Image: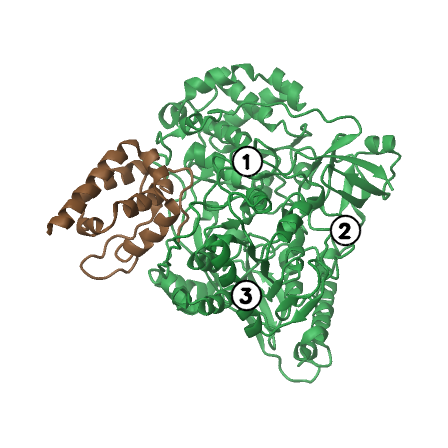
Amino acid sequence: MRKDNKKEISRRRFLKVSASAAATASVAGNTQILYALTTKGSAKSTGVQSNIEKKFSLCDMCFNKCGLIARVEDGIVKKLDPNPKVLKSRGMLCARGNAGIQRVYDPDRLKYPLLRKGARGEGKWQRLSWDQALDLAAEKLEKIGGEYTRCGTLFMAGSDMQSKFVHRFAEAYGSYNIISHESNCLVSRNRAFLDTYGEMPIPDVLNSKYIIMPGSNRFEALVTPDSIDLMSAIRKECKLVVIDPRYTKTAAMAHEWYAIKPGTDMAFLLALMHVMIDEKIYNTDFVKNKTNGFAELTQHVKKYSPRWAEKECQIPAAAIARMARELAAAAPAAMVYPGRRTSDYTDSTQIRRANAIVNALLGNWDQPGGFVVAQKIHLGNIPFEPDFYEDNPDDRVDVNRSPMMFDTEGAYKHARDAVIEGNPYPIKAFFTYKTNPMQTGANRQKTIEMINRLDFMLSIDIMMSDTAWMADLVLPAASYLERMDPYATQQGVSTGPCLVTRDPVIKPMFESKSALWIVRELARRLDLGMHFDFTMKQFKEAQIKKHPEAVKAIKKDGVYHQKSKVYGRYDGKPFKTLSKKVELFSKRYADAELDPMPVYKRPKKIPSGRFQLVVGRSAAITQGSTTNNKLLRELVSENELWLHPDSAEKLGIRNGDRVLVSSVVGKQKIRARLTREIRKDTVYMDTGFGVLSKGLTSVFGSGACIAELLEDRFDYISGNMAMHETLVSVRKI
Amino acid sequence: MKFGKFIKSILTSIVLITILGSSSLYAKEGNARKGKYLFRKYCRECHTDGATGDRAGKALSPIDKTQAEWDKIFKSYKSLACADQWDKRKAKDIKDIYAHLWGHAFDSPSPAKCE
């Protein structure tokens, strides 16, 4: 266990740190809040009754949006607790969620609009008024739109409940170059499951009896409800097998762990199929009635025996065969877990196709303990009819670089290359909202190169992230506890879908504004105001019009659960694929000259003295968005390079030594952590450190940036970034 | 119907029937990007939640139909209650709208996101 993890944080200390951080924030910009937070200034010490309120909200420390209750005293958030009524988060709020108070009162919060004055990344800024900032942004967008068409501006918004308004603004402005964070995360998984089942299912972990988890680390890379359900499941009768080059905390809790050779997951999955088909232990009814291409698959996997797979993935053949039998015996309440982030290999879509196909053989679709169909609660909208700009190019800038890229997500890797190359057309402006590709996009130097090609870059964020640090104009966003957000559907898996929302817990501090306010003001200046002729309250009324019962429930409990059938929703219904069945063989892939079934390609041998760098998660870190948080820094203050002691010995490296890690794209200095919890040919480090932004005063100077080291390879089908394809060398400094 | 309009309507139908024989080709020929804007402009007025008036239709999005269903609709649009509205559009506009709807259909490789 690392040193930092041994530090126990008591609740009292937690609140003390929070309050002191908040006080510093106040010094930086708001004396009223400073007064409210100090002991002297508190109502308690003056004998006056505090005004204590409890308000519902949703966490924003990662993408999960768990339900919470904020305790607010005299307008100051004092404590965040889980909302037990929100079944999706199973009444849980993790360490990051608890530390959300520090996000709001972080002294490094952006407080007012800033205009870059020095060179990019130099950190010289001039304070602007909102009017000055918005006038300037509108003028730049107008000018670039005129010179390079409206598609000459690239928009990128992170996972946020107000990102939809940034997308709306992009469309009203006339650009269809809108990319999400997802191509740095999970699009290859979605691609594979959509192309197999017609949609992305959600795993019913709670009711599963047997789970194989290849590459997922659910007890650290938290996903609600899966992480909590997994703990509940294994406490009952569920068997958990983890396949991972690292001995993660999930591996530590598993019944079995296999340190698979990186890049060979498909060999393991194909061998599972081989055994199930060879021994006829697959779900015959499901395969016969609901799948397409079983005959082709039977032929295809004949050569992929467990004995063959053992040589590839280094998992014993007998164990593979046993796992296949145990999985099949537990089916349909069994699964190979689909995972979340799949930005790993250049054939990551095909690896997840293999995952999807094993599950199809189990017949676990729409079954308890298997895969559940995601359900939407239909919400209203305020429609808009923007104009089309006839001089716009025919398509997106990142088009034709991967055959099956999602139009609705785009691909960061491809868009960035397109901007650098100026091909197929120039992009001269970049508009970001709450996303940080400087930290999340592999090959940071390329992101810098892209930004240096721009005439104008605007970033809306809460903090001076590395991405904001590179911008021309930085606009301060309101944090999640300060703003009203639209309604959204969440998936509780076995508990069905629910509706959630955010209302302000406290008033926005400093000069921070919501994304809706910012894009509305920009739209007004660009004569596009008609597309934003509504307040957030009006938008929410339009959304919820058909669900008056939800309004009451949310007011009472902070959540509305819709009673609905969870299993058997596909009874008698066709799958949303071309064949209307589960596509073991994909005709669409065959037509696109892609392998219609997953074909294993052996990864390149790792040369002696070099290591495969893998990406993963700590439960205390959401990449660069939380590493500056002082409360969480008490858990993980900097990242370290996980290195096996036997490998370290050959390099003369001891535990705690500073080492230089080098790849073909970059170098970083980091402290070595010698551990047997990783393979000898693999190294690992947490994300979110080694920041460039001096506006992140807590984390600046800590650890190394993994994005600086990672090569920007990509999944050839979906355009998902492939972040496990980088080899590094390590030497003692 | 005036002769000019009649001819235009016939030509639109011919273009649609001819090219819809090979749907994906047709989708490639149309500009899906522009089609999204045109769909909103010309179709959403009636095909949206809360639409009122004689022509109020069911809310529509590309994912409400499969590619085959969109093919069918575009081939037989004459039987729709709003056929006269289709006839008012240029053949190119209809092609663009089709490219958007077909390209982001329920069973397409890139289904539209709910709005």
Taking A213 as reference, is A297 above or below it? Answer: above
Residue located beneath label 1 in the image: A337
Q: Which chain is brown?
A: B
Is residue A236 or residue A652 the one in the foreground? A652
Say which colour chain A has. green
Q: Secondary structure at mark 1?
A: loop
Do discs 3 and 1 share a chain?
Answer: yes
**Residue A405 in view of the camera:** yes
**Which kind of residue does numbered mark 1 sit on?**
Tyr
Whole-percent x, y for residue A226 in the image: 55, 44
Discs 3, 1 touching: Cβ within 8 Å: no
Residue located beneath label 2 in the image: A638
Whole-percent x, y for residue A73 in the image: 61, 75
Q: Residues within 10 Å of mark 2 (few under 14, many from 20)?
A: many
Q: Nearer the viewer, mark 2 or mark 1?
A: 2
Q: Nearer the viewer, mark 3 or mark 1?
A: 3
Taking A478 as reference, is A670 above or below it? Answer: above
Farthest residue, direction front: A147
Is residue A514 or residue A49 the one in the foreground? A514
Q: Residue at x 53, y 27 (%)?
A: A327
Is residue A226 or residue B78 the one in the foreground? B78
Q: Residue at x 45, y 29 (%)?
A: A360
Q: Secondary structure at mark 3?
A: helix
- Count all numbered tags in the image, as a single digit: 3
